[in-house]
Image: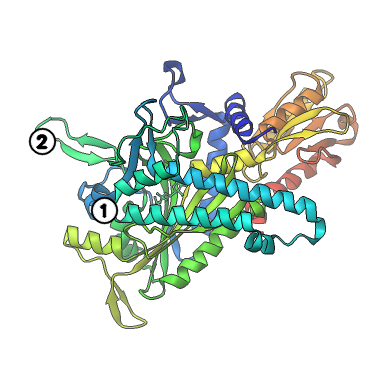
């Protein structure tokens, strides 16, 4: 595919054309940064959620689930710091009238330096062939070192300015770097201002007595306020975790980022409660465990990297992102945060209720420390979907569009295709559908030549096509075509279920962790 922008456009249009993601309220021209998941999208999203839940809850004796309400008592957000500190630094371009996040403009500038480094590496790798030592090249090539030092210095200065609320310096940095409006190129900027990202709403029927509420901007706080309830009723012993998936809402300033940054999105979060002083070990352990979970899906080791934060959120003593190579470059996919005892202590103070744990092993009562893993489900969807969408040149000179979704996540596991619409083949095919649908999502397709049907299923991401032909009537066998290799295999109908199960079973995928 030609370049990053083309690839991204292709991802967005494929997601629509094949019933994965639609713009919200499209008949009214849509709603900015809000999307709907269509018939295939909803299955892919559910499968990703299940894959996470199995790995995090079912496979850990000491992690349990929770489904807290989206509405929470408003003091929650005062205690958590969101009312005072959940802000983005915004800047307006006076000519184009477009609004941007000042930190994103600066990060994108640094991202371009990273792209230059990648290009230098690719050029050198070609020049030196097998003898190329990437690490040494990164550490010694003057141009690359220069780009890296420049990028680091910019990010460090921005981090410091944001931490000190020195918004004038953030604007000065944008001007010094001569960053223009991405749309118009204009460098005519307003001052940088802070903007709170929470959506407000009201609870109650009468205007006088209605209570101001917020739509939750993260699911984590539902876990913190339930910490003691779960610990006591579940008789949980530290270390233990509480996991939940659910909607979160942020009034993001965004432009054309599809489901990467949305105003309504879903998070999959886990708060792991530990003894104070052990948080660093658990932080390292969860970084490793979460990366392994990602790698188990086989999207390619080189597409992930850690980014350790210089600028820490108000609640953290260490934080890192797992970044993924999206079509528009490496960006945050998941955050792992060592949140100290900030949240529980804050809720303790604001509620007047003790949120402590008695540790029988050391005979002490304390407010636990927390290590959090937090991943956006929609962002994970985009990572999987964009990585899987490929255009392949075939030996006969044609190209095929294929969505190589990990089989465990694919919305439809198999398509059952009678070779022709007569001679009793549809009846046999439908019988196979009836049998398989108890175990997997399967589909029946009899329209068009079989080659076209294969291509349709390739583009849809279906890992297996099962073709019923005239021989089937005699030998009770079918042809299974594998999406990724296009290999065809003759198997007994009675063996089909086991073959598919082997390939789509969550256990077999998670065992790769
Ligand atoms: N509880 C911690 C927390 O919410 P975060 O880094 O703000 O941390 C965690 O968010 C993850 O949620 C991110 O890594 C990202 O995957 C996802 N996320 C955050 N904002 C998002 C948005 N506007 N649209 C889609 N996903 C988002």
Render colour scheme: rainbow
Q: Could you tell me which secondary element the residue under label 1 belongs to?
A: loop
Instruction: Name the spot of residue 191 as percent of width and height, x first.
Output: 30, 39
Asked where in the image residue 400 lies, by quadrant, the reply is top right
Residue at the spot x=80%, y=41% of the render?
Answer: 485
Identify the residue under disc 1.
81
Residue at the spot x=83%, y=33% of the render?
Answer: 394
Q: Nearer the viewer, mark 2 or mark 1?
A: 1
Identify the residue under disc 2.
209
Q: Are marks 2 and 1 in contact (CB under 8 Å)?
A: no
The answer to whether residue 375 is above or below residue 344 is above
Q: 422 left or right of 74?
A: right
Residue at the spot x=43%, y=30% of the render?
Answer: 186
Quadrant of the drawing holding the N terminus: top right
Q: Residue furthest bottom?
A: 362
Instruction: Name the spot of residue 366 as percent of width and height, x first.
Output: 28, 74
Which is nearer the N-term, disc 2 or disc 1? 1
Q: Could you tell me which secondary element the residue under label 2 belongs to?
A: loop
- The answer to which of 227 and 170 lies nearer the viewer is 170
Neighbor class of circle 2 (other Cα within 10 Å; few <14, some 14-19, many 20+) is few
Q: 32 left or right of 84?
A: right
- The answer to which of 15 and 314 lies nearer the viewer is 314
Quadrant of the drawing holding the C terminus: bottom right
Q: Is residue 181 visible?
A: yes
Instruction: Name the spot of residue 103 as percent of width and height, x first.
Output: 40, 45
- The answer to which of 482 and 30 lies nearer the viewer is 30
- The answer to which of 448 and 84 lies nearer the viewer is 84
Residue at the spot x=76%, y=40% of the render?
Answer: 484
- The CA span between labels 2 and 1 is 25 Å
Instruction: Name the spot of residue 437 as percent of width and height, x first.
Output: 65, 36
Q: 419 left or right of 303?
A: right
């Amino acid at each position: 595919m030609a370049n990053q922008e083309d690839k991204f456009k292709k991802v967005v249009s494929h997601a629509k054309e094949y019933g994965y993601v639609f713009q919200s309220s499209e008949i009214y021209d849509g709603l900015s940064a809000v999307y709907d998941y269509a018939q295939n999208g909803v299955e892919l999203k559910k499968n990703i959620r299940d894959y996470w839940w199995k790995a995090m809850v079912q496979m850990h004796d000491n992690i349990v689930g929770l489904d807290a309400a989206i509405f929470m008592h408003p003091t929650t957000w005062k205690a958590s710091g969101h009312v005072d500190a959940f802000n983005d630094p915004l800047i307006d371009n006076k000519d184009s009238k477009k609004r941007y996040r000042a930190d994103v403009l600066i990060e994108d500038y640094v991202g371009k330096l990273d792209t230059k480094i990648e290009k230098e590496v690719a050029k050198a790798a070609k020049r030196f062939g097998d003898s190329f030592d990437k690490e040494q090249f990164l550490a010694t090539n003057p141009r690359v070192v220069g780009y890296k030092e420049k990028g680091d210095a910019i990010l460090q200065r921005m981090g410091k300015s944001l931490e000190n609320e020195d918004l004038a310096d953030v604007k000065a940095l944008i001007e010094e770097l001569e960053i223009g409006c991405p749309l118009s190129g204009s460098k005519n900027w307003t001052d940088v201002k802070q903007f709170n990202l929470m959506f407000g709403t009201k609870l109650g029927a009468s205007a006088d007595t209605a209570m101001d509420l917020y739509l939750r901007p993260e699911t984590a706080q539902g876990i913190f306020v339930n910490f003691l309830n779960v610990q006591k009723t579940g008789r949980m012993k530290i270390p233990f975790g509480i996991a939940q998936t659910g909607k979160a809402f942020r009034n993001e300033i965004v432009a054309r980022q599809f489901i990467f940054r949305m105003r309504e999105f879903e998070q999959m979060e886990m708060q792991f409660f530990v003894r104070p002083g052990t948080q660093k070990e658990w932080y390292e352990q969860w970084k490793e465990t979460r990366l392994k979970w990602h790698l188990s899906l086989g999207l390619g080791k080189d597409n992930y990297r850690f980014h350790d934060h210089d600028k820490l959120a108000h609640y953290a003593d260490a934080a890192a992102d797992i970044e993924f190579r999206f079509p528009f470059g490496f960006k945050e996919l998941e955050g792992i945060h060592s949140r100290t005892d900030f949240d529980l202590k804050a809720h303790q103070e604001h509620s007047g209720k003790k949120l402590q744990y008695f540790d029988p092993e050391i005979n002490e009562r304390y407010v636990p420390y927390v290590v959090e893993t937090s991943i956006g489900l929609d962002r994970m969807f985009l990572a999987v979907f964009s990585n899987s969408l490929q255009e392949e040149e075939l030996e006969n000179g044609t190209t095929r569009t294929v969505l190589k979704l990990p089989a465990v996540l694919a919305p439809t596991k198999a398509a059952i295709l009678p070779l022709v619409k007569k001679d009793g083949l549809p009846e046999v095919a439908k019988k196979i559908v009836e049998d398989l649908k108890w175990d997997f999502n399967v589909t029946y397709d009899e329209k068009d030549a079989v080659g076209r049907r294969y291509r349709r299923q390739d583009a849809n991401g279906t890992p297996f096509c099962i073709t019923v032909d005239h021989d089937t009537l005699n030998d009770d066998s079918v042809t299974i075509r594998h999406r990724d290799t296009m290999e065809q295999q003759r198997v007994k109908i009675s063996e089909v279920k086991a073959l598919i199960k082997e390939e789509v079973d969550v256990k077999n995928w998670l065992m790769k962790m």
